[in-house]
Each structure stands twice: as C-alpha cells, then as structure tokens.
Image: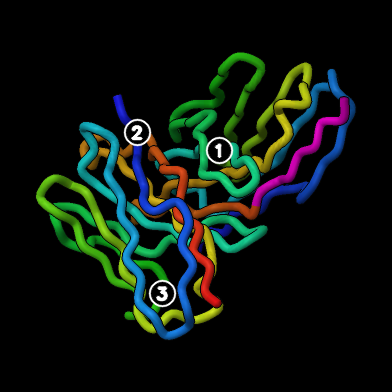
Amino acid sequence: DAGVTQSPTHLIKTRGQQVTLRCSPKSGHDTVSWYQQALGQGPQFIFQYYEEEERQRGNFPDRFSGHQFPNYSSELNVNALLLGDSALYLCASSFTGEVNYGYTFGSGTRLTVV
Amino acid sequence: KQEVTQIPAALSVPEGENLVLNCSFTDSAIYNLQWFRQDPGKGLTSLLLIQSSQREQTSGRLNASLDKSSGRSTLYIAASQPGDSATYLCAVLGSNYQLIWGAGTKLIIKP
C-alpha cells in the first residue's frame, strides 16, 4: 500500500520563476494538505484541498496556489519565486471522515531558489 | 490562536538512557496530538497519535502522554539508541483541521 508520494524530490529554481510540486495521497485518503518547512523550524500550513476545492488556507500570499484532481492528487504552484521560498514542501493526506486517524506525510520536495 | 512549544530545543544523552521530550499547547480544544520524527533533510514519520479523549499511547520503546487540561504532552523514549537520533516534532489538530506545530527537539544519542 503506497503512502504519500511527492515529486520531484529536489528542485532548483531562479528568482522570479514559477514552480509546480506534485503529490499523490495515500490510498483511501481524499484530503491533501500542503506545508512549508524552513530550515530548523516546524512546518507551516499553506492550504488544504478537499473535493477539488481549497477548504482552508494559512497565512501565505496569493503567489501560492493549488489544485486537486478528481483522483485526489494535488499540485502546489508558486509564482514569482523569492529567495525566502526556499524550503522543504511537505504534502500530507488524510480521510475527511476520519480526521482523528491523523495525517500521513510524504518525504517532501526540497526547493532551492537562487 | 493556538501556539505549540517544545522544550528543550536540543538534547544530547548517552546511549541507553531514558529521556522525556516535552510539548505544550495554549488551546485545549484539540482533536488530537501527534508526535513525528524527522531525519535530516527528510520528511515526517508519524510515531504516535493521541486522541483528545485519550491519556497515553505506546509503541515499542515510545510512550506519549496527553494532559489536555494543562496543555501538555510528553514523549518518553526508553533505553535510547543512536538510531533514535533525529528531530522530534509534536503537532496538534484543532477544530479548523489545521495542524499546528512545535519547532521540534533535536535529539542526539551518543554511542
């Protein structure tokens, strides 16, 4: 049973460019959340997708956008990249009907902006 | 606004010792609390999840407790091993379905 899969694992981009990160949730999960983790800090919530719509959003600018597909997979898009966007981006999946069963995380995408 | 604090930020102990990591939160209205492990440059591995109605959970050498009224959780690691070296993070799930995280405790087990 595959867990959460994220791609790519590493990415280097130039300031001002755009990037798309991808996530496939754990089998049976229908909700995908995205987190940004800067070095030495805990993850920060970006947004959550359920039924192909953004259900919750953290304190991130509109440069951060996302999408969820009918198969529950998700993309995170970041436009006009800044040096400060360099971080580990984590995807977590869960089943909305069983929120108390917790979240399963992927291995993350390491984004470096130069 | 929920805030999660982990103390200490770093801990170094000799192999074989028992140790306790602490996590505190300011809002007791939570669904659950999870402890995660993160190896350098890697993703998050869930260790234990405690529902708001539970007091503790155990998995192998790990035991996590939850005291909602005081806003505290502890992760107890018995007979520590060098392979336990990692950063340990706690996160609480609130009514808005967002996980709020501590900054983590970096644990080093010396052989």
Q: Kindly report which numbered mark, 1 or 2, lies closer to the viewer in this rendering.
A: 2
Residue pointed to by mark 2: A3
Height in image: B76 above or below B28?
A: above
Q: Check disc 3 and give the amino acid type.
A: Phe
Horizontally, residue B5 falls left or right of residue B97, namely: right
Q: Which dot, 3 or 2, sits closer to the camera?
A: 2
What amino acid type should be assigned to the residue bearing mark 1?
Phe
* Image side of residue B73 versus residue B29, left or right: right
Q: Quadrant of the C terminus of chain B?
A: top right
Of B29 and A31, which appears nearest the observer? A31
- Amino acid on which disc 2 is placed: Gly
Magenta-tinted stretch: B104-111
Compare marks 3 and 2 and give the one earlier in the sequence. Answer: 2
- Mark 2 residue element: loop
**Residue at the image position 57 percent from the left and 59 percent from the top:** B3
Subunit bearing disc 2? A
**Which residue appears at 18% of the width and 47% of the height?**
A72
Residue at image mark 3: A60
User: Dot 1 corresponds to which residue?
Assistant: B36
